[in-house]
């Protein structure tokens, strides 16, 4: 259903941004830095969240899409909603639009060579790309959409820098002497569920456990000492290339 904003006697479709002045852009920048920068980076060039300075958006590129995505969040991703007035969110949209004029340095890596590095270093044993590979580590099919090159480089060199709860490791021993290790899936007062290192889902009653520990470090090894500078650049370029085709701005506001 279309929403409308009333300005005087004129009603305009919400797709047109009414907050596009330089003052609005500045206000949007302040909101962005206080609420969006932890994921997208202080300069919006990406971190845990994608780079927003290219003008390419993967969940709708119209102003109305951006307004809805910022206000409501994006289902199936880590993007939460920003619970502010529409005017304030419009200012954030104006700020994001202003970033597209920035110049960008092209990656100096070779994605094709990086794919060979990915395969040669055994990354596919734990990570899936387009349905192929293991499930122990994160699915990387669209990782270039979700992470900046800087974040990807950090993940390769220092996996412990950012470990999400989904990849916390649980180690436990049952009262009858069985040992288990796996990735924590869910935990409540009475039970714990995890995926073991053979990719089997397990559920345990805590009352049946003799020992139980959660380790918040990464099971992924650092490649700091096993990749040369060129290999690292190529691998990051390959990972950055893994992304879906962007929606066109004229493709409607479906997300």
Image (cartoon, rainbow, N blue to C red):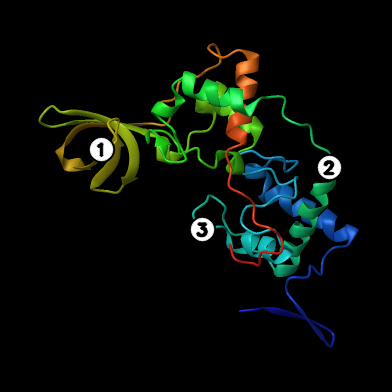
Residue at 45% of width from left, 25% of height from top?
123
Indicate which disc, 1 or 3, sits on the residue closer to the N terminus.
3
Residue lying at the far left in this picture: please name it.
176
Indicate which disc, 2 or 3, sits on the residue closer to the N terminus.
3
* Element carrying mark 3: loop
Residue with the mark numbered 1: 200
**How many neighbours does mark 3 have within 10 angstroms: few (below 14), some (14-19), or many (20 or more)?**
few
- How many numbered markers are drawn? 3
From the viewer's side, name the closer residue of 15 and 170: 15
Measured along the vertical axis of the image, is residue 175 above or below residue 72?
above
Residue at 55% of width from left, 39% of height from top?
143
Residue at 82% of width from left, 66% of height from top?
19
Taking the image as shown, residue 209 lies to the left or right of residue 220, namely left
Disc number placed over residue 219 in the picture, else none: none
Residue with the mark numbered 3: 75
Residue lying at the far front in this picture: please name it.
112
Disc number placed over residue 102 in the picture, else none: 2
Position of residue 174 measured from the top left corner of the image (x, y, whole percent): 16, 32
From the viewer's side, name the closer residue of 217 and 120: 120
* Residues at marks 1 and 3, CA–CA distance in whole angstroms: 26 Å
Instruction: Quadrant for the C terminus, please.
Output: bottom right
Indicate which disc, 1 or 2, sits on the residue closer to the N terminus.
2
* Residues at marks 2 and 3, CA–CA distance in whole angstroms: 29 Å
Position of residue 148 measured from the top left corner of the image (x, y, whole percent): 64, 37
């Amino acid at each position: 259903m279309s929403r409308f904003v009333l300005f005087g006697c004129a009603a305009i479709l919400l797709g047109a941004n009414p907050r596009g002045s330089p003052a609005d852009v500045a206000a949007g920048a302040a909101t962005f830095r206080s609420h969006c920068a932890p994921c997208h980076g202080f300069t919006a060039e990406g971190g845990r969240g994608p780079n927003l300075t290219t003008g390419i958006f993967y969940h709708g590129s119209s102003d109305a899409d951006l307004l809805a995505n910022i206000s409501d969040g994006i289902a199936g991703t880590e993007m939460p909603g920003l619970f502010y007035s529409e005017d304030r969110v419009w200012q954030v949209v104006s700020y994001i639009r202003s970033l597209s004029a920035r110049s960008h340095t092209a990656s100096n890596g070779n994605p094709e060579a990086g794919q060979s590095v990915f395969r040669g270093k055994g990354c596919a044993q734990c990570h899936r790309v387009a349905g192929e590979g293991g499930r122990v580590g994160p699915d990387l099919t669209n990782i270039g959409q979700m992470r900046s090159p800087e974040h990807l480089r950090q993940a390769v060199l220092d996996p412990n820098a950012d470990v999400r709860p989904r990849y916390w490791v649980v180690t436990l021993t049952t009262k009858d002497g069985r040992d288990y290790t796996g990735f924590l899936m869910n935990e409540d007062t009475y039970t714990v569920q995890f995926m073991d290192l053979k990719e089997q889902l397990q559920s345990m009653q805590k009352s049946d456990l003799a020992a139980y520990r959660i380790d918040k470090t990464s099971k992924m090894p650092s490649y700091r000492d096993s990749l040369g500078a060129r290999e690292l650049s190529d691998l990051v370029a390959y990972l950055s290339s893994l992304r879906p085709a962007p929606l066109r701005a004229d493709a409607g506001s479906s997300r």
